[in-house]
Image (cartoon, rainbow, N blue to C red):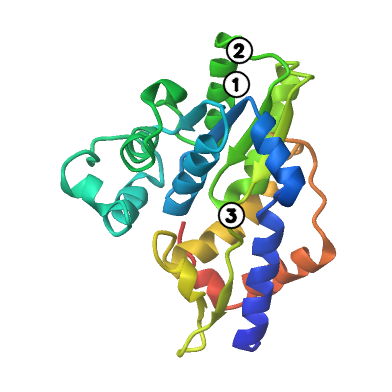
Amino acid sequence: MTAETLCRDLNSISAWLAFDNLGSGDIGGQAIESTDVIVWFGNQVVATIAEACRLCAASRAPLILSGGRGHSTAQLLDNLRNSEFASLAGDGSITATMGEAEMAAVVAVRAFSIPPGRLILERESKNCGENARFCQWLLADGGFVGETVILIQDPTMQRRSFLTWMRQASQARRVGARLYSHVTFVPQVEPGPDDLPRLVESQRHGTWPIERYIGLLLGEIDRLRDDENGYGPNGRDYFDHVEFPMDVWESYIRVSASPLRSLATR
């Protein structure tokens, strides 16, 4: 299998996982202006924090920052130390003892001048399911009913986060709620000089090492499967049954059968 084919397959999987129903232009702008709350799920991609802060600044909505200490916390700190927000880690405002929501809050206040009163921190969650559940508890405690929510997450986890939130909302009978899934960018890879995939230049900083990125893509498909090992109704039952587009499934099969499977880390 050629490097070009593997890259096309990875990009096919990525584009499907990066689910976005917010839209752009007038439609997206109206949704941002009318939203009741913006929610950021903790992850290691620095650009997602910046986008959540940008949307908060462009609206009147509060921003929920969700994330304790989990599998991405150390990577987020490393990415922040090597980003445009490096001075916040250098001066001690962001430290290794913080959770993901706390790190993001420092960026929001110090870099985007968002008043602390517009931030709601959820500091306990360690995974996507807890992100959704704990955030909805906060909304219920705050008296939000029939709210419009914009959700931002690591692009590779955006579809699963959307589905998990929707299941939690259904179980809590938040029937009037409307959820917009917003992707900061759609990850893309290209063949590198060694014929292994690499992220395109604009996405190589503040995101993922290529080994972790491949692991995240394959891991997300594994989790979205509706079998005893997946998170669908026939597995852990975290969300409703998911139908995979044929091209995405075929891409997953080819990548899984390639040497990239052994290269992937999670």
Whether residue 225 is visible:
no
Q: What secondary structure is found at the residue carrying circle 1?
A: helix
Residue beneath disc 2: 140
Instruction: Give residue 213's position: percent from left, percent from top.
Output: 50, 63
Three-letter code for the amino acid on which mark 3 is drawn: Thr
Crowd band around label 3 with a 10 angstrom C-alpha radius: few (<14), some (14–19), many (20+): many
SS label for mark 2: helix
Q: What element carries label 3?
A: helix
Q: In this view, does 183 lie above or below 175?
A: below
Callout in the foreground (2, 3): 2
- Measuring 40% from the left and 47% from the top, which residue is drawn there? 72
The residue depicted at 70 percent of the width and 16 percent of the height is: 172
The local crowd at label 2, few if under 14, some if 14 to 19, many if 20 or more residues have their Cα within 10 Å, is: few
Graded by Cα atoms within 10 Å as few (under 14), some (14 to 19) or many (20 or more), the crowding at tag 1 reads some
Nearer-N-terminus badge (2/3)? 2
The answer to which of marks 3 and 1 sits earlier in the sequence is: 1
Q: What percent of the width, then of the height, locates residue 4?
A: 64, 85
Tell whether 266 sits left or right of 220: left
Q: Nearer the viewer, residue 242 or 188?
A: 188
Q: Are marks 2 and 3 in contact (CB under 8 Å)?
A: no
The residue singled out by tag 1 in the image is 136
Residues at marks 1 and 2 touching, judged by CB atoms closer than 8 Å: yes
Residue in front for this viewpoint, 35 or 157: 35
Q: Is residue 101 visible?
A: yes
* Residue designated by label 3: 156
Q: Which amino acid does label 2 sit on?
A: Ala
| Amino acid type for the residue under numbered disc 1 | Gln
Question: Could you give the CA–CA distance between mark 1 and mark 2, rounded to whole angstroms?
Answer: 6 Å
Spatial separation of the CA atoms under disc 3 and disc 1: 22 Å
Counting every numbered tag in the picture gives: 3
Residue 130: x, y in percent?
53, 29
